[in-house]
Amino acid sequence: MIAFVSGPVAALAPNTAVIEVGGVGMALQCTPGTLSRLRIGEAARLATSLVVREDSLTLYGFADDDERQVFELLQTASGVGPRLAQAMLAVHAPDALRLAVSTGDEKALTAVPGIGKKGAQKLLLELKDRLGEPVGTTVPAARPPAAAGWSDQLHTALVGLGYATREADEAVSAVTPQAEAALAEGGTPQVAQLLRAALQTLNRTR
């Protein structure tokens, strides 16, 4: 098993980071929160989890070992694959997920794309004795950048992908109505979706 990778960031994409390790580029699937902390050319260390399928080997990257552990524990629940587990971590920090499960918070789980009410109820039952109690001193309800600070995270991610500050500003402005619509409906702006939309607007202007 590959426990972590360490090296300079060679490339960044909306869902992927490429880390150069010994002259080899390792492609890691990452959440927007993890990607926003990376900069091309700068050294990075990401905890990893290797998912093996008959026709593929996929490496997932995480900000720390705790996030990687929660990613793997989430997949012990029926119906939860690596993509859904990663989506859960894109919306909620590890301790926020522990708190949601320990308190039976359905609403927190249904905030994750792909999880409905019945699915949330099932997950709460299956994960109750697996994730454990929150380990931090303070527990956020969700990752702050996904709510009020979505624009900051999106801007940081775009700059990290190599776009100029002015281009990032314009792209954030272009997708702001989409984010505000989600907030008006009581939902949470999904930074991964906004990033894809922002990149489309940038590609059209180039």
Image: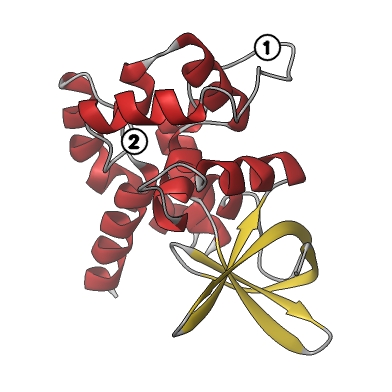
Asked whether residue 122 is in view, the answer is: yes
Q: Is residue 170 above or below residue 43?
A: above
Of 202 and 114, nearer the camera is: 114
Asked whether residue 148 is in view, the answer is: no
Q: Are marks 1 and 2 in contact (CB under 8 Å)?
A: no
| Colouring scheme applied when the structure was drawn | secondary structure
How far across and how far down the image is residue 75, in percent?
A: 50, 48
Q: Earlier in the sequence, mark 1 or mark 2?
A: 2
**Element type where label 1 sits in the image:** loop
Which residue lies under the disc numbered 1? 138
Looking at the rendering, in which quadrant would you find the N terminus?
bottom right
Q: Is residue 79 above or below residue 200?
A: above
Q: Quadrant of residue 50?
A: bottom right
Which residue lies under the disc numbered 2? 112
| 34 to the left or right of 66 | left
| 82 to the left or right of 176 | right
- Amino acid bearing label 2: Val
Of 175 and 87, nearer the camera is: 87
